Amino acid sequence: MLILLKLAWRNVLRNKRRNFLAGIAIGIGLAALIFTDAMMIGMHQNMVASVTDTFLGHGQIHREGFRKTYEVEKTINNGMELAKKLEADPNMQGVSPRVLTFGMMTSPANASSIMMYGVDPEREKLVSKLADAITAGVYLAPNDTNKVLIGTQLAKTLEVEVGDRIVITVAQADTGELSQEMFRIGGIFTFGVREMDGQMAFVPLGSAQRMLTIGNRLHEIAFHFKDLHIANNAEDPFWAAYNDNGNETQPWKELVPGMKAVLEMTEYSSFIVAGILFMVVALGILNTLFMSLYERMFEFGVLRAIGTRPFRMALIILFEAGLLGMLSVIIGVSMGFALTYIFSIVGIDYTGIEFAGMTFQKAIYTVFDIKQYLTFPLSLLVFTMLIGIYPAVYAARLTPAKAMRRSF
Amino acid sequence: MTTDMNSDVISVQGIRKIYRSGEVEVEALRGVDLTIHSGEFTAIAGPSGSGKSTLLNIISGLDLPTKGQVHLAGQDISTMSGNELSDFRRDHIGFIFQSYNLIPVLTAAENIEYIMLLQGVSPEERHARVQEILQAVGLEGMGDRRPTQLSGGQQQRVAVARAMASKPDIILADEPTANLDSATGAALLDMMRDLNRQHGMTFVFSTHDDMIMERAKRLVILKDGQIASDTTRRWPVIDSAQAEE
C-alpha cells in the first residue's frame, strides 16, 4: 500500500504546475465557501441584533388577540405584576412596560396618523435603542409628562422641530370617546426604518395611560434576555411559564415571521454556495485526473502488464485524487482564514441599508465557526475521493494491450 | 520459478486474432500454433503488420485471442479472472518493452523492487535481490537514479533487471533494441544471452532487428498472421566481438 501512496505522491509532484493550479482553483472555491458562511453568520447576528435591539426586544407579552386588532381594552392581565416578576427573573437584562394605540397627531401645518407608545424612559433604555436614536433634542426624562419623541419622517410631514407643539388624539378605552392632549416635541429620533421614523411617537407611560383611561394597565411588556439563546429556543420552559391567564408570550421570531424567513434563507445560502463549489470541484478534479491518466496510458499498461491488480490501479488514482484534495484544502483553508480574519476586524459596512424590514445599524463582521474549518474541508476531501472513483474505475478496467496501444 | 529444461513454458494452438474498428475487420493472426520450451532464446520475426506484437501480447496474457487456446506454464489462461491473470503475469512472466518501460517516478532500484513488493517479498530479501540483480546487469551503484538520469541502454538494462526480479518462467521482450544504437543494443542482447546460458532463463523476442535474429537460437518467422518458418540453429550463433570483426 505504501508503494502505491509513494507512486501517487510522486505522480502529483510530476506536474507541479498543473496540480498546483488545480489546487488553487478548487481552494478558491473552498475559501469562498468559508468566507460566505462567515459573512452569513455575521449578517445573521447583525440582523437579529438590529431587529431585537432596536425596539422589538427578544420577546413580548400581550393579551391574547391584542396584536390582531390593537383594541385599547385588550390589556395584559396583571400587567404590572408580570413586569415586576420578569424584572426579578435572573435571565433578564431589561423589561419595558408599554402602552400603545393608534392615534392622530396634528400640527399647525399638517396631520398624520401615528402609533402612540407610552414608555417608562429608564426601563425603555434597557430594552431598546430609542435613547441612542435621538438626533435632535433630548430623550424623555423620568418626570416628563407632556414631552413627545417623534421620528424624522414624521417631523418632516408635520413640519415641526424640537420645541414645537402638537396635539395627539386617541380613543379612550371602554367608552371610545376621543381624548386630546397637547405635547411639546422633546426630541426627534432616526432609526433608519421608514415605518418607525414616519409613524411612531413616544410619550411618558403615565401620560398615555391617563389619555386612554386604563389606569396602570399595560398593552405590551417587551424584554431582553442576558443570553440570546433563550430567545432562539422556543422549547425553553420560560415561554410556557408566561403563557397563561389569557396572556401570550412570544419570542421575536414569532413577532416578525418575515424576518425569520429571511434568516432561514441566509442559512440555506451556505448550502447553495457549497453545492456550486462541489460542482466546480467535480469538474476540476475529473479534468486533472483524466488528463494525467491519458498522458500516462502506456505507463498504466506497463503497470498492469507486470502484475498490478486492477484494484491497486484504482487505488493509485484514488490516492492521487486524495492528495489533490488535500492540497486544495490547505490552500482553501488558508485563504478562507485570512479573508475571514481581515473582515472580522475591518467589517463590511452596510450601515443604514434597509433590508427585509430592518436596517443594519452596524457593519457586518465575519464570524469564525468550527464547521468552516472542519465540516467544509472534510466534506471537500471526501467528495474529491468520491469523484476520483470514476477515473479510478476507468484505470482499473484498462486492459494492458489496449492501454499500451493508446499511447501511440 | 523457472520450470524444468525441455518442458513447455508456452503452448498456443489455433490462435486467431481479429481487430474490429467500426465495420472494418483486420485479422492479425490466422491460426498460429507455437510451443516455446524452457531455456529457449527465441526470436519471433517478420515485417511490420505480420502479427509479432499481437502474438506476444496473446502469449503473455496481455490480450485475449479471438479464437484458440493459450497455455502458460501448463495453465490455460483463458479461464483466469482479471486478478488471477495479473498474479500469473507477476509470478511467471517478465516483460521488456520497446520504450517507456520504467515507472519514471521510481528509481532504478524501486522499479526492480516493485514486483517483489507485489509478491510480498520481505524487505531484507528484496534489498539483497535488488543489489544482486543490479550487479548481474552491470548497473551496480546506480540503483538510486531515476530513469531520466539513465541512458537508453541503462534504462533497458533496468527493464531486464525488473523482468528478472520475480524469477519468472519466461521473459518476453517486444522490440527491446528499437530505440538503441547498434553498439548498445548488441551489448544488451549479449547480456541477455549470457543470462540465458548461465541461468537457463527463457527469452522470447518480438523483433525485426537483424541483431536479435542473428543471436537467436530459434527463429520463428511470421508472415501475414501465420508462421512462415520455424528454425532452430546451433549455438553459439554470433556475439558482439564477432560482429565487430
Image: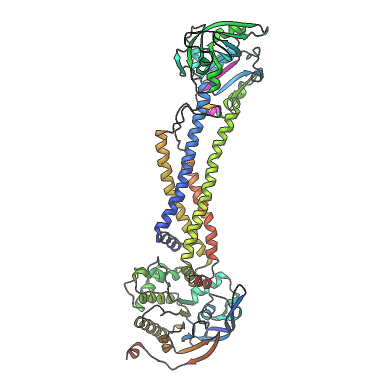
- In the picture, measured across the screen, residue A198 lies left or right of residue B244, that is right
Residue at the spot 62% in from the left edge and 24% down from the top edge = A240
**Residue A194 placement (x, y as % from top left):** 54, 22
**Residue B141 placement (x, y as % from top left):** 31, 72
- In the picture, measured across the screen, residue B116 lies left or right of residue A109, that is left
Q: Residue furthest front?
A: A109
- Report which quarter residue A57 is drawn in: top right
Q: Residue furthest right?
A: A175
Q: How is the image coloured?
A: rainbow
Can residue A91 be seen? no
| Total numbered labels | 0
Is A221 in the magenta?
A: yes
Residue at the spot 41% in from the left edge and 71% down from the top edge = B112
Residue toward you, B114 or A276 = A276
Can residue A182 be seen? yes
- Report which quarter residue B113 is drawn in: bottom left
- Report which quarter residue A251 is drawn in: top right
**Residue A317 placement (x, y as % from top left):** 49, 61
Is A239 in the magenta?
A: no
Residue at the spot 38% in from the left edge and 77% down from the top edge = B157
- In the picture, measured across the screen, residue A77 lies left or right of residue A288, that is right
- The residues colored magenta run A215-231
Q: Compared to B230, does A204 lie above or below?
A: above
**Residue A62 placement (x, y as % from top left):** 62, 18
Residue toward you, A387 or A241 = A387
Residue toward you, A21 or B211 = A21
Residue toward you, A185 or A161 = A161
